[in-house]
Amino acid sequence: MSAVEITAPGRRAGRMGRAQIVNVALALGLVGFGLGAWATGETFLITLATKVAILGIAGAGLNLVLGFGGLVSFGHAAYFGLGGYASGILAHHALNYTPMFEWPFVFEGSTSMPVIWITAMLVGALAALLIGALSLRTTGVYFIMITLAFGQMIFYFAISWPAYGGEDGLPIYVRNGFPGLNTLDPIQFFGLACAVLFAVLGVTAMLVRSRFGLALQAARQNRQRLMAVGIRPGGVLLVAFVISGAITALAGALYADLNRFVSPSMLSWHLSGELLVFLILGGTGRLFAPLAGAGLYIVLEHLLGGVSDHWQFFFGLMLLGVVLFARGGVIGFLAGGKRNG
Amino acid sequence: MSMILLIEQLLNGLQSGLMLFLMAAGLTLVFGVMGLINLAHGSLYMVGAFACAGVAAATGSFWLGLAASIAAAAAAGAIVEVAVIRRLYARDHLDQVLATFALILIFSEGTRWLYGSFPLYLNVPPSLSGSVTLPGGIQYSLFRLAIIGAGLAVAAGLFLLIGKTRIGVQVRAGEADREMIAALGVDIRRLYTLVFALGAALAGMAGALVGTIQSVQVGMGEPVLILAFVVIVIGGIGSIKGALIGALLVGVTDTMGRVLLPSAFALVMETSAATSMGAALASMAIYILMAMVLIVKPGGLFGARA
């Protein structure tokens, strides 16, 4: 169920049903694809499905600010990459037995996913707080360029700081562990990624329907009116930006574990662009847009990549066509109903 | 740190700043007049560089290559404007970002298809190779000096064009109120194509000149594009004067930061740590500059709108 329909009571009965069916179908499709690949022993396809789930989490983070808050952040790779580096650096210290810091207490690093996830989310939230506080002073096209520029700042820092591999990146020799699971088993790691994805989508749905979420959507639709009812849009948007940064960083930590490798490419502006592409392909402002978009993107990458080395050329043409002529994305096409605001 | 090295780096900063200005001028004009954010501007820079490399290799003349870079980028700009960009003026910024992002994919992958992934190298024309001795005994590359001269000349020409000519009046009027200028009988569609092609030509020229110093390869436009964004955010979107001042600030800060910061840290820590710390901070210097400008003036130094 997407909150968009809640703001459009006239369409409620029919549309909500269809959107819900599409959402359930998407969720079942992902889980079913993973299980099917497992049953037939296609490890590569399980990895592909895991990638979709993780990129879906990252997209969900961006969707909170872009789809519901109307902020076009072109620098979300920053949080994704910071989450990845949080995972890589903690594991690096733990695996090499070199304490990260010895004061005020000795900290050895960690290979435990819960510890890594919390660290990644804190790092992502802190970065989003700093970048958001500065960037939200501006609006519109300034905001796009400034988030892009801050993303590049972190990218160049990662490239020129040699302690953690610099341009070469940082390998994670053994995938980090989760209590009670064998994360080295692809299907168990896939299950974990799916669980996180559905938890994040659930939290997003709750947030969007809460008072906070209504204020957030109001900030997208009309800042003056929001101020008129006594809510400062800046504060609401900053909180959303921080939550979004934390979610995206969580996805980054999982992605680093999927590849067992972190490199500055996770911070690159191409990735920020791809996250935006997921949402537009899926249908901006729809709860399941990130999953639909990431799935479609990965499937296309896989299929077109098999046909031609220059698949990005054809993908570019297709994306251009979608933006110019087919607004509303996959979910808009399947579920119908125009999104408000 | 010798004075000579410092002046030499200052000149390098000036040179890279002026090339950034050629990029930023087109971006800021397109945003100011049409309200469009164009990510594909870096692709036009790349088109210029490849056209120059291709024609220079075929004819042996750098000057024909330079002319080809300007013509090819202007033509590519005009075609893209008519085919795609024109449909985006009324759309929101998100659609503009995504459509021009798609254009980058098309341009980059198309160029890789045609030329392969290996970098091409351009030769400095014989009449501009070698170095000159500046007052004070500084040896400096003649070609870089020529680029500084060309950048200053183009900047002056652009200010004259915008400030003193009929086209310039129309561009400024288009910036202020596009409905009104259309009502006054100016063909606004042609004006938009013209402005876009002009910006593209400047980007193509910058691509050819910088490509001669560095190398010509796929993806070369993207780092420059982002620097040009920083420039126009600092200068204020839509302002040519702001773009010039912002470009010089960014060019000099970036170049000097890379030289001075490592030696500054070397005063307080050991050399290898100072080098890495200095390099890491130098790569962030222009973004810190941008953040500081934004804290003081959220609309940029010369921006009309925030």
Image: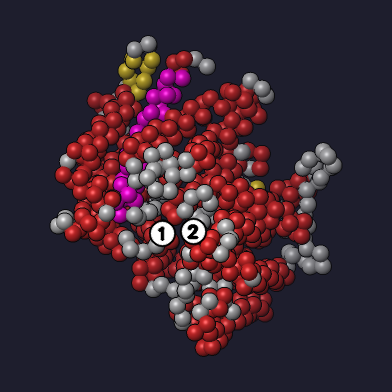
Q: Which mark is residue B93?
A: 1
Give me the residue at 32% from left, 49% from top: B32
**Left or right side of B6 for A46:** right
Looking at this view, is A17 or B58 the one in front? A17
**Left or right side of B142 for A284:** right
Q: Secondary structure at mark 1?
A: helix
Q: Residue furthest top?
A: B136
Residue B48 visible somewhere in the drawing: no
Bounds of the magenta segment: B6-34
Chain bearing tag 2 is A
Give me the residue at 59% from left, 23% from top: B264
Residue B89 visible somewhere in the drawing: yes
Kind of residue sitting beneath label 1? His
Q: Are marks 1 and 2 in contact (CB under 8 Å)?
A: yes
Badge 2 is on which residue?
A: A72
**Left or right side of A32 for A221:** left
